[in-house]
Image (cartoon, rainbow, N blue to C red):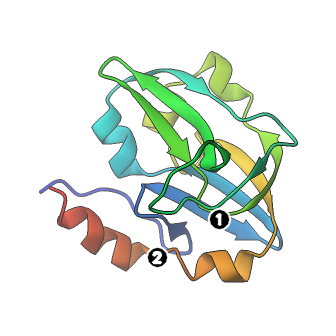
Amino acid sequence: MMAYKTPVGLYYSKEHEWVKLEGNLAKVGITDFAQSKLGDVVYVELPEVGKAVLQATEQKSKEMEIGAAESIKAVSSIYSPISGTVKEVNEALKDQPELLNTKPYDEGWLCVIDAKDAAADLKNLIDSKSYEAHIATLE
């Protein structure tokens, strides 16, 4: 089994997004596991600033999508791990989509969401140890 980076202090969704909370602002990206399964990312579709998003649940909807990553293999939707309003997007990904592959937790972040109720949403997310156990079941 491959060892994937799962930094401590982030929250993870079972759909393979991560959240770093700073007050009410949630920086969001995709996990190392997700980028490795995608393969080489060639294009990233980012959400519009001001878009209202809902935390992804089992029943996916357009309001839960915050973008897509296109790789040589496929196009994958990226779902919001938290509800709120998109405040900022990572413009660097437009010219350097490969940052999703090379630095998924650093320069490869997707967007910042102004969380509506972070405390409630965090109850549906997991910590790094639980996320590692989750991806171990997928390998």
Which residue does the numbered mark 2 point to in the structure image? 126
Q: State the count of labels.
A: 2
User: The residue under label 1 is which amino acid type?
Assistant: Lys
Q: How packed is label 2: few (under 14 Cα within 10 Å), some, or many (20 or more)?
A: some
- For the C terminus, the quadrant is bottom left
The image position of residue 31, as x and y in percent, is 44, 52
Instruction: Judge by depth and name the residue closer to the eye, 54 or 21.
Output: 54
> From the viewer's perspective, is residue 58 above or below residue 8?
above
Q: Which mark is residue 37?
A: none
Q: Which residue is rendered at x = 61% and y = 62% of the image? A: 19
Tell me: 136 left or right of 40.
left
Mark 1 and mark 2: Cα distance apart in space = 12 Å
Q: Amino acid at mark 2?
A: Ile
Residue drawn at (63%, 27%) of the image? 93
Kind of element beneath mark 2:
loop
Nearer the viewer's eye, disc 1 or disc 2? 2
